[in-house]
Image (tube, grey):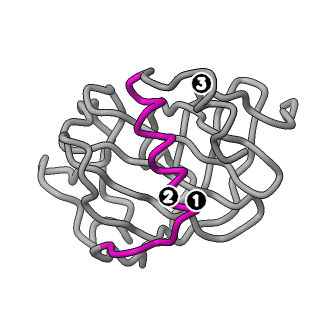
């Protein structure tokens, strides 16, 4: 498999997560920024993706997850926007969630192994089970600036000047 150095802004990529060498989830994401120090991408409501569910069709429990007792079904991402920030080589990513009205909802730290990029545009971190979801407060001006950039990019409301001034 050929490695790709960087993804381009607005490029569609596929985020795939694995559990015990099986697809846990997969879905398209849009790149906002890809630099040596940060990869930022997002998913918007209405996106079709693959999501895990228990064999009985319900939610995956810690026990069924640990045993690998799950299937992956098609779902529509509906409830919120998600911006994911990943430092290349790190064992975590930060997810920022926004409600449908674009108000801030929460943030989440996902413990995972480092991802890899492929020429086909897929990114594959391996999630760890213990990842805390924490109601968000202030993540600092740089993170909020990137969030603002992601919101505008989501709706293509960004001017060329705003794009040029966005965090690079």
In this picture, which residue range is highlighted in magenta? 136-155
Q: Earlier in the sequence, mark 1 or mark 2?
A: 2
Closer to the observer: label 1 or label 2?
Answer: 1
Between residue 55 and residue 58, name the one nearer to us: 58
Q: Residue at x 59, y 29 (%)?
A: 13
- Which comes before the other along the chain, label 1 or label 3? 3
Select label 3 or label 2 by which is in front: 3
Residue for badge 1: 126
Rendered location of residue 1, percent (x, y): 84, 31
Residue name at image x 69 percent, y 32 percent: 164
Question: Does the CB distance between marks 3 and 2 fall below 8 Å?
Answer: no
Which of labels 1 and 3 is toward the front? 3
Image quadrant where residue 74 sits: top left
Does 94 sit left or right of 78 as displayed? right
The residue carrying mark 2 is 19
Left or right for 93, reference 117:
left
Comes first in the chain, label 3 or label 2: 3
In the visual, does 117 lie left or right of 153? right
Q: Are marks 1 and 2 in contact (CB under 8 Å)?
A: yes
CA gap between label 1 and label 3 equals 24 Å
Residue 83: percent from left, percent from top:
45, 48
Q: Is residue 133 above or below residue 17?
A: below
**Residue at horizontal 52 percent and vertical 63 percent from the top:** 127
Q: Is residue 13 above or below residue 36?
A: above
Task: Assign the magenta stretch its main secondary structure.
Answer: helix
Between marks 1 and 2, how big is the CA–CA gap?
A: 7 Å
Count neighbours of disc 1 (C-alpha within 10 A) and say few if under 14, some if 14 to 19, many if 20 or more. Answer: many
Label 2 environment density (alpha carbons within 10 Å; few <14, some 14–19, many ≥20): some
Q: Please name the residue that numbered disc 3 is placed on.
A: 10
């Amino acid at each position: 498999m050929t490695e790709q150095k960087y993804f381009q802004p607005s490029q569609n990529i596929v985020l795939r997560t694995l559990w015990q060498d099986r697809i846990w989830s997969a879905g398209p994401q849009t790149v906002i920024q890809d630099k040596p120090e940060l990869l930022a991408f997002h998913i918007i409501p209405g996106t079709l993706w693959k999501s895990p569910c228990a064999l009985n069709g319900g939610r995956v429990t810690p026990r069924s997850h640990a045993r690998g007792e799950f299937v992956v079904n098609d779902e529509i991402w509906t409830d919120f926007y998600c911006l994911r920030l990943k430092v290349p080589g790190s064992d975590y990513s930060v997810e920022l969630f926004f409600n449908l009205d674009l108000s801030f909802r929460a943030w989440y730290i996902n413990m995972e192994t480092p991802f890899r990029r492929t020429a086909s545009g897929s990114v594959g971190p391996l999630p760890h089970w213990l990842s805390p979801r924490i109601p968000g407060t202030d993540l600092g001006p740089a993170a909020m600036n990137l969030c603002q950039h992601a919101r505008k990019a989501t709706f293509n409301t960004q001017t060329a000047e705003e794009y040029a001034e966005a965090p690079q």
